[in-house]
Image: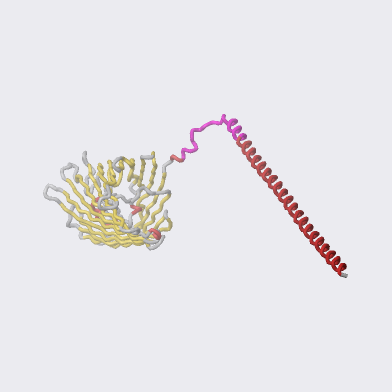
Amino acid sequence: MIRRLVLCVLVMGLSCGLFGQENEDKKTNEKNNTDKKIEALEQKVNELTEKLEKVEKQNELNQLKERAENLSRQKKKKVADTGRKFHSGLRQQSALNPNISMGGDFYAAFGTSKSDYNRIRSDNSCGTGRMFLREIELGVESALDPFTRGKVFMGIGEEGIEVEEAYLQWLNFPLNMNLKMGQFKNQFGKLNRYHNHALPQFDRASVLVRFFGMECLNGFGLAGNFLLPSFLAHVNELDIEFVSGGDDHSFTSQGKQNFITVFHLKNYYDINRSTYVEIGLSGAFGHHNARETDQTRIGGADITLKWAPPDKAKYRGIEWITELLYSSRETSAENINAFGFYSSVQCRLGAWWLISTRVDYTELPHYPSLKEKGISFACDFWQSEFVFLRLQYSYLDRNFEDNDHRLIFQTCWAMGPHKHEAY
């Protein structure tokens, strides 16, 4: 019995061992099969990657071949086109044409005075009682070379055609100097250089008209502009001008040596990002008679304060200009002294609207006992940068003529750049 039990135990142990060995053999076989499958997949992936790389290289090679063929065709075309004619850049000569512009200035004026002194247009009055063509201005400007500019401005009006300015300008000379030669308006004070269409009001201040006439101080000559070291100011400029001419008000246009010497010193200060101030001193010396024996000396001082926020300069801004003039006129008996000033304020209310006012006072340089004073209010509507309309009311009070209330409607327009000077 015991033997049978031992035999059963041995048989069962051998069976379990054989069964376990079979399980281990199965697991080993499965692992080997999985490893073989992974190796096969990796081999296929490597084969596909090599094929893709070969295809990409072949495509790049084909693209390079196409580019080379295109370049070779272009070269062949250029070689085959060597017989065409060369026209020396005739089609590019239009780039050398100057900038040409034209502007118009029309107005209608109505006044209460019945005196011909006020009603008739003259060198002292803009006239009243009808509509006027003040001026058609033709401007031609060109950069002749990197160092030289040429500018010509001709005025066409009821009196005919006249040359307002025609000068040559040389830039960037040594000592920070620019030179100008020709017919030009002198750099005296603030507004003498301004053309009529650029004035803050319709007319010029009474002191400028009485001292220099409607056409301002101008002549033919030579001018130098010097940029001085920034001493006690951010920018200092000095203008010295020698001209032959005269306005027949303070200086004679007759005689063999009718020369006028003009200087202007400008000091510029930045107060902040939105505000700056300019202070200027001016002087003019010349003769007032054809015999060239008696001289006239005129001194002036001007100040300009401008506020314009950089982010809203198109919509907001204020400019205040004040100028004082003093004249000393020699005669055989005594010196005649006269004084005058004006103060102008212009405010920008938006992109289209501006309002301004000006106060005037002057003594006549020939007869200081004759005085003129006045006040003006103007409203400007800028339809665009090329067209603006202006309505102005002025009151003139004189002790030698009738007082006059005036209403003026002005229209100004421009074709082309029409930017003759950077004021």
Q: In terms of depth relative to the viewer, which is nearer, 181 or 183? A: 181
Q: In terms of depth relative to the viewer, which is nearer, 7 or 103? A: 7
The answer to whether residue 27 of the structure is visible from this angle is yes
Left or right position of 368 against 205? left
Residue at x-position 36% and y-position 40%: 148
Count every numbered label the image shows and give the total: 0
Residue at x-position 19% and y-position 42%: 290
- Residue 53 vertical placement versus 397 (above, below): above
Q: Main secondary structure of the magenta part?
A: helix
Q: Quadrant of the N terminus?
A: bottom right
Question: Is 92 colored magenta in this rendering?
Answer: yes
Question: Is 364 colored magenta in this rendering?
Answer: no
The answer to whether residue 391 of the structure is visible from this angle is no
Q: In terms of depth relative to the viewer, which is nearer, 353 or 88? A: 88
Q: Quadrant of residue 174?
A: top left
Left or right position of 80 against 356? right
Residue placed furthest toward the bottom: 1
Q: Position of residue 401 (x, y in %)?
A: 22, 59
In this picture the colour scheme is secondary structure
Residue placed furthest toward the top: 83
Q: Position of residue 349 (x, y in %)?
A: 38, 63
Q: Quadrant of residue 378?
A: bottom left
Residue at x-position 83% and y-position 62%: 14
Residue placed furthest toward the front: 2
Left or right position of 412 against 121? right
Q: Where is residue 335 in the image (x, y as percent from the top left)?
A: 14, 50
Q: In terms of depth relative to the viewer, which is nearer, 418 or 413? A: 418
In the image, the segment drawn in magenta is 72-94
Q: In which quarter of the image is residue 95?
A: top left
Q: Position of residue 39 (x, y in %)?
A: 72, 50
